[in-house]
Structures are given as structure tokens and as C-alpha cells.
Amino acid sequence: MNRKRILAAMIIIIGSLWSPISAAERKVLTLTLDEAIARALKNNLDIAVQAFNPELAAGQLIKAREAFLPQFALTFGSDHSENPSYWWLQGEGTSIDKLNNYSASVSETIPTGGSLSLSLQNYRSETNQSFQLINPRFGTTLSFRFTQPLLRNFGLKIARRQVIAARTNLEIADVELQGTVMETIYLVQEAYWNLVYAVDSLQVKRQSLELGRDLLAKNRKEVEFGQMAPIEILNAEATVAQREADLIQAEALVTRSQEVLKSILNFGTEDGGRDLRLDPSDRPAYQSVSLNPDEALESALGNRPDLQALAKNLDNKTLNLEVARNQMLPSLDFEFSYGSPGISGDRLMYLNDDPFLGVIIGKVPGSAGDSFRDAFKFLYNNWTIGLSLSFPLASALSRADVAYARTDLAQSQTRLKNLRKKAELEVGDALREVESNAKRIEAYRLARELAEKSLEAEQKKQAVGMSTNYFVLDFQDRLANARLLELRSKIDYILSVERLEKATGTSLVKRGLKS
């Protein structure tokens, strides 16, 4: 018996030496469950990490859409070449040619997989070679080009596959973030109610210890007045020592439970989290919930983020298979182009209209503006229309892509079926747990009331000498245990309801975080 008392005293001393900050020096923060959830949603690191994924996915979606934005291009080039003359048409000396190029174009990929382009090209050329009719010469060409795949790469879905996949990935990132939020909410609830249990359990153990100490003090007075033999108080002393040790364990459980909750709420050393003591103000209360298995299962299949993410990922797999099948088709492209040229410049006038004489007697000036004007008047129509057909030589690779995409899709479909089966099992387990925990509350309430009455009766018996310390202490332990079991049943019921909401995917809707 003395060993137990010595052990309890050592534990108390060690505990007091280990604690660097006394309870009076620690800051106390009173928290409701809703306040704890709000802080977790704001500061939890898991949510902070997951919140980047929708932003990254949104960036990929913007990048995919940019493929269908118009592209503008401007080019300029200047060429100067000098060569020795080597035949009689060039004349004598050095042949000098100058060429300046200017162009502007706009092109765009259209959602059907084709492309459109409109360009305006202009040049100025000048030479010292003989027998020229226009020198310098200005040229302008307005051209339009349209191409459209008719087999491979044809179609809205095939052409926009990057956009569709990026949009689906954004939706997946959103539902995965919802899943992280839902998981965080449940972790906060679990940690909060476990802290409540630890705090209330500590209070129960303190009450039990006080009852034991009161009985021990009463026994010592009886021994002092000779109404009880000294040996009779040994059992009371041992019980008090044991309850002191239990109290220390309960205090350690409170400390541990607080650290878990502070970790989820992201209280760090920089904001005084180490010196902070959380005081949960909510207390467990029984609130009956309606249990409809069919509705619960339907809600789970429609609201659970993990099922939604996998179903959306299945859409990407289906699209990959469609694209792989399309790539096995021959390439049949329709092409159409149209061009309107305009030419102007200084027209040279030769003696007797004979350029072979090489005698220039005048010129009719021209300008670049004249070539622009003629091009936009569509004086000269040049067009091309045609079809080009080609067969893929790498058909074996294409078949491999189709086989891979088909297998990948089948795997995802099987994974989705398996996850749905697990969801059904989780919903069923959660429903049964809620129902059984509701019954436990009533049973443990009755057990606690009976324990209270039994202890009261045993104390009355002891007062008239019909009972001993052993039985009174035993009934005290039974009452403490009954109170703890009742408290645990209430906590378990609340957590089982929260697990049901998590299994059915309704916890976000319940808190107004999802429409």
C-alpha cells in the first residue's frame, strides 16, 4: 500500500518538474466547435496546400484556351546582293539587287480543328540590271487561307481536348479541395470532442479523488477517536493513491488532446501556441437524427468528393480513348486559299518602245500605295482548292495507344465501382454506429443513475455500521466509471453522426460551405 502512495507522490513531483509553465501562467482561449472549425478552415496547412491546386489547374485551363486565340505576326526583311555580271542581259560591271520585305498576318485555330489565316505581304525591289520594265517595283499581296481536317483531328471534342481536359482537371481540383476541407472539419470535430472528453474525464477523476480523500479524512478521525482500527484505513489510503495516479494520467490526456487540436488549428510557437491552453466551451448533447438508408446512400453517391473526383477523372479517360481512336483514321484535309496581288512602281519608257536598245527616255512614276490599292480592289484573282489524303505509317503505335487508353479507362471504371462499394459499406457502418450509440447513451445514463443510488445507499449503510470502506470505495469507482462511460457514449454518438455526414458527403452543405 505504501508503495502505491510513494509511486503516486513521485509521479506528482515529476509532473510538476516537467511542466515548464504553470497553469496560472498559461493563456486560456475559450473555443466553441464552430470557432475551432472556422480557424482550421482559415489556417490549416493541409487546406492551404490543397488550395493551390485549383489555381494551378485554372492556369492550365487558361493556357489551353490560348491555343484558340488569334496570333499576330509582323515581319521585316532587307536583302542586298552584289554579283559580277556574267552575261550580256545584265550589262557590264556589277549586278546590284535590293529587296525589302514587309508582312503582317493574323491566324487562328478554330474549334473544329481547322485554321484560318489572313496575311498582307508587301515588297520593294530595285536592280541595276538592264531591260527592266518597272524599276523600282512595289508588290502587295492580300491572301486568305483555310484548312480543315475531315477525318483525323476533326471535331469539336477532338480539337478542344486540351481545354476539356484542363476544365475537368479544374473541377477535380475543386472537389479534392472540398474533400480536404471535409476531412479537416471532421478532424477538428474529433479532436475537439476528444478534448472535451479529456477535460470532463479529468473533472470526474477529480471528483472521485475528492470523494476518496473525504472518506480517508473521515476514517482518520474515526481512528483518532478510537471508533476504527488503524488497519481499516489502509484500503482508503491505497485507493486515494491510485486515484491520484489516475488524475495525473487524465491531466496528461488533456495536454495531449490540446496539442492535437492546436496542431490542426495551426497554433505555432510564433503566435504563443505553446503557452496557450484551449478551453472547449461546448458540451456533448444528444440530438436525434433521422436515419434513412436509401437517402443516405443516394447522398453519398452524389456528394462525396472522392467519388466526384474519380467520376470526373473517368471523363478524361473516356476522352483519351476517343482521341486515340481518332488518331487511327487517315489524314484527309481540305485546303482553300485565295490571293489578290497588286504591282506598281516606276514604269520605264524606252526609245521607240524597244527595251533592247537600252535607251531610257522617261518614266511613269508609281508608288507602294498603288500596289496596296490594286490588291484591295481584287483585280487579279488567284485561288487554290484541294484535298490531301495520307495514311498513318505508325498504325501499330496508334493501336497501342488505343489499347492503353481502353485499359486505362477500364481500370478507372473498376476503381470507381470499388469506391462506390466502399462508400456503401461506410454509409451502412455509419448508420449502424449512430443507431447503436444512441442506444448506448440511454443505457449508460441508466447505469450512471443506478451507480449514484447504489453509492448513496452504501454510504448510508456505512453510516450505521453495515458496510465497510472497501464497499464504499468500490461503489465510488463504479460511479466514476459509469460517468465516464456515459460521457464517452455521448462523445461517440456525436462523432458517429459526424462520420455519417462525412460518409454521405453532407458536412459541407450542413455548414453552408457548399450549395
Image (spheres, rainbow, N blue to C red):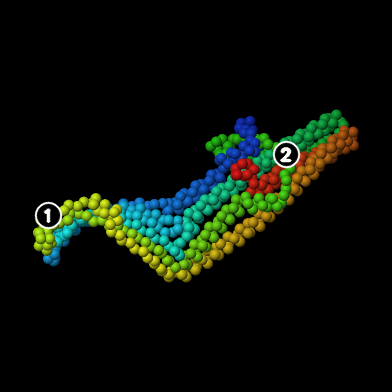
Q: How far across and how far down the image is residue 279, in percent?
A: 65, 35
At 70% from the left and 47% from the top, the residue drawn is 496
The quadrant where residue 130 appears: bottom left
Give the Cα separation between the discs numbered 2 and 1.
109 Å
Q: Is residue 234 visible?
A: no
Along the line of sight, the residue nearer the viewer: 345 or 12: 345
Above or below, comparing residue 280 to residue 74 in the picture: above
Residue matched to label 1 = 362
Q: Residue flagged by tag 2: what amino acid is it?
A: Ala
At 77% from the left and 46% from the top, the residue drawn is 439
Residues marked 2 and 1 touching at CB (< 8 Å): no
Say few, some or many: other residues with alpha carbon within 10 Å of mark 2 (under 14 / 14 to 19 / 20 or more).
Answer: few
Q: How far across and how far down the image is residue 313, in percent?
A: 55, 56
As drawn, the label of residue 285 is 2
At 28% from the left and 57% from the top, the residue drawn is 379
Q: Residue flagged by tag 1: what amino acid is it?
A: Gly
Along the line of sight, the residue nearer the viewer: 83 or 186: 83
As drawn, the label of residue 245 is none
